[in-house]
Amino acid sequence: MVEAGRAPRSGTFRTAAERLPAVAAMGFDVVYLPPIHPIGTAFRKGPNNSLSAAPEDVGSPWAIGSPEGGHDAVHPDLGTIADFDHFVSRARELRLEVALDFALQCSPDHPWVAKHPEWFAHRADGTIAYAENPPKKYQDIYPIAFDEDFAGLVRETLRVLRHWMAHGVRIFRVDNPHTKPVVFWEKVIADINRTDPDVIFLAEAFTRPAMMSMLAQVGFQQSYTYFTWRNDKAELTDYMLELSRKTAAWMRPNFFVNTPDILHAYLQNGGRPAFETRAVLAATLSPSWGVYAGFELCEATPAKPGSEEYLDSEKYQLRPRDWAAAEAEGRSLAPLLTTLNRLRRRHPALRQLRDITFHHVDNDALLAYSKRRDDDVVLVVVNLDPFHTQEATLSLNMPELGLSWHESFPVRDELTGETYHWGRDNYVRLEPGRAPAHLLSLRPSPSIGGSLS
């Protein structure tokens, strides 16, 4: 919250609940919350990950724990557990699920540090080692060590998870699960799903492919992916063939267009057209996709040249946003996100992973693919170049569309409302700023509205 002439103040569960109707109106099914727990003061980070914090700095929500409580407590600035229950209840009224970040780590002030010193790795001088995930360093966070009391950590983790489940949370976004023993997650997830099979665990893991597959195989129902770093035609094609063929039996991808940690150079440099392109790709390639706050406002300033961190990241400070002004001035991508989610609901083909076909385009700046489920067929052509108009001849694999080689057929562009008659070979032209893509239904449906502006 912002008052003229004063520093920003934290919102609360109650004020955040006022934003939920706008999230639901965009067609999303889940609202994700970063850690909502008390934040430590020892080695607290300042803005932009600085090592010195002023008294008014709020610290990082991932530095969990203070004398006010740990993983089962709520930060007092956010309200009470009753206020959290209200937030969840309001979300449910809007048919939204609440996903909660679960980061198994502690600030030096967490009650676990004094109560369970055996849960942490100690240096030779007796001090506890802080967390590192190269090249990142987290001086305000202690990682968990599993060697001394594995069973105790399993019990406590189950207690914390079931505490939040009792308050309506059915989805957990697990922070850096690849830095913990795989067998730990296998035991925890199996125990939870034995009694609550509807609870979903999302692995926030950017690590070796073998480890990402292993996490999926031991129980994680969804996984972050390398989508962020797949931006050209060959990269996207190869990666989607891997996800839809090689690993589809055990791994369910979730394509996030951005995260609290990652602002890719493609978005930094490509302006609004780059944001539109990545939204279309994520929403049409993957059965599940996600948007972290600020994406719809095209926030694109890095912490420094060459960095993938946001400048003034809300990992370390409060970041007020004027959503209403952005929408009123036409700066928000909310209309596009709304259209994409409506199309995903209308077209079952977009909500499945395996049945995807890539079609030949004689221009590497354009990517074409179709998805099919029974008689629902959607064809997507995307301009991967956010700077220049691109044109080409698109040659369709007609049998993969359920058509004969010489058949002509009507298509409706669900993003613009335009209708074309196409055949095997078709001329396409896409101009950044006007339309990032053709999103074509082969059995045209009634107009659903939405806009790119």
Image (tube, helix red, strand yellow):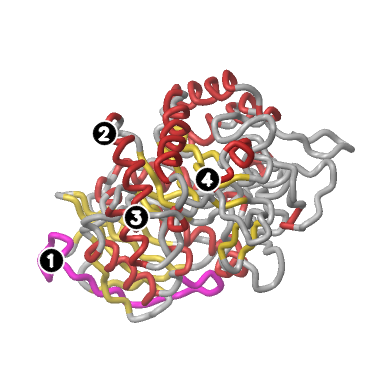
Mark-to-mark CA distance, 4 and 2: 22 Å
- In-front residue for pair 276/434: 276
233 left or right of 125 in image: left
Circle 4 residue: 103
Across and down, in percent, residue 163 comes to 46, 27
Q: Secondary structure at mark 4?
A: loop
Q: Assess whether mark 1 and mark 3 are in contact (beta carbons under 8 angstroms).
A: no
Residue interval drawn in magenta:
384-406
- In-front residue for pair 54/295: 54
Q: Earlier in the sequence, mark 2 or mark 1?
A: 2
Q: Residues within 10 Å of mark 1 (few under 14, many from 20)?
A: few
Q: Secondary structure at mark 3?
A: helix
The amino acid at mark 4 is: Ala
Mark-to-mark CA distance, 3 and 2: 18 Å
Circle 1 residue: 399
Mark-to-mark CA distance, 3 and 1: 36 Å
Q: Earlier in the sequence, mark 3 or mark 4?
A: 4
Mark-to-mark CA distance, 3 and 4: 16 Å
Q: Secondary structure at mark 2?
A: helix
355 left or right of 209 in image: left
Q: Between label 1 and label 4, give the one nearer the viewer.
A: 4
Q: Earlier in the sequence, mark 3 or mark 1?
A: 3
Q: Is residue 36 visible?
A: no
Q: Residues within 10 Å of mark 4 (few under 14, many from 20)?
A: many
Residue 403 lies within the magenta run: yes
At horizontal 25% and vertical 55% (from top left) the residue drawn is: 250
Q: Earlier in the sequence, mark 1 or mark 4?
A: 4
